[in-house]
Image (cartoon, rainbow, N blue to C red):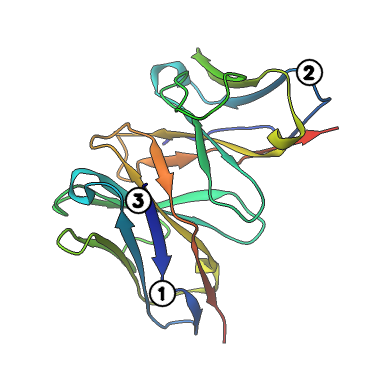
Amino acid sequence: EVQLVESGGGLVQPGGSLRLSCAASGFTFSRFWMHWVRQAPGKGLVWVSRINTDGSSTNYADSVKGRITISRDNAKNTLHLQMNSVRAEDTAVYFCARADPGGSAPMDYWGQGALVIVSS
Amino acid sequence: SYVLTQPPSVSVAPGKTARITCGENNLGGKSVHWYQQKPGQAPVLVIYYDSDRPSGIPERFSGSNSGNTATLTISRVEAEDEADYYCQVWDSSSHHPGVFGGGTKLAVL
């Protein structure tokens, strides 16, 4: 059974840092691209970032570029999202999701999400 | 870059057909994916590559994409279909490739 489990969410002060993780199981993690998607309270889904199978290629939404870094550890079947200089507008549930390799594949499995609250 | 436009809400009576649209210029030239999200839950893929249905998704769910509009159609709507639905495309020409529509709240009357 495919499972994606996010962790690392919580309360962080504006300007602070946070690292989210996504533990994958039930599939060959290294064969899939991985994505982060976020959802602010009461709002819609917003794509945040993606990483290819070996981590050599990444993309970011304009709203987070320069502040957020996606990475993966294929040996540990884990995806990460390092969030720096966080802002109030980064408050959201962050979902990790997998997709087949390539630029057009759907996100077919999602984790349950990790809540990040940016507040003083 | 793509901006996908969805109606904020659609209402339908049980047993009837619901159609949720997703619009953008020349959207028919892109592959559209659809996700269902119920309150407090993660999104679930219900239609991919315009009209393919993942295993486990009822045949009542179907999709089409032509011209400027992609459509998610739910036939014989059931109460359990009440959810938010999002269309999504990948814009490979953009450095910000992931695009979601704003979402449509399907209300089953």
Q: Secondary structure at mark 3?
A: strand
Q: Secondary structure at mark 1?
A: loop
**Nearer the observer, B108 or B5:** B108
Horizontal and vertical percent for residue A114?
48, 66
Task: Please tell me in which quadrant of the rendered image residue B78 appears.
Answer: top right
Q: Is residue B6 above or below residue B67?
A: below
> Left or right: where does residue A55 sit relative to residue A65?
left
Horizontal and vertical percent for residue B39?
67, 52
Answer yes or no: are tags 3 and 2 on the same subunit: no
**Nearer the observer, A12 or B3:** A12
Neighbour tally class for label 3: few under 14, some 14-19, many 20 plus, Cα within 10 Å:
many
Answer yes or no: are tags 2 and 1 on the same subunit: no
Q: Amino acid at mark 2?
A: Lys
Q: Chain of mark 3?
A: A
Q: Is residue A11 visible?
A: yes
What residue would you read off at disc 3? Answer: A35
Q: Secondary structure at mark 2?
A: loop
Q: Is residue A61 visible?
A: no
Give me the disc on residue A8.
1
Task: Please tell me in which quadrant of the rendered image residue A21 appears.
Answer: bottom left
Q: Are marks 3 and 2 in contact (CB under 8 Å)?
A: no
Q: Alpha carbon of mark 1 to alpha carbon of mark 3: how far?
A: 16 Å
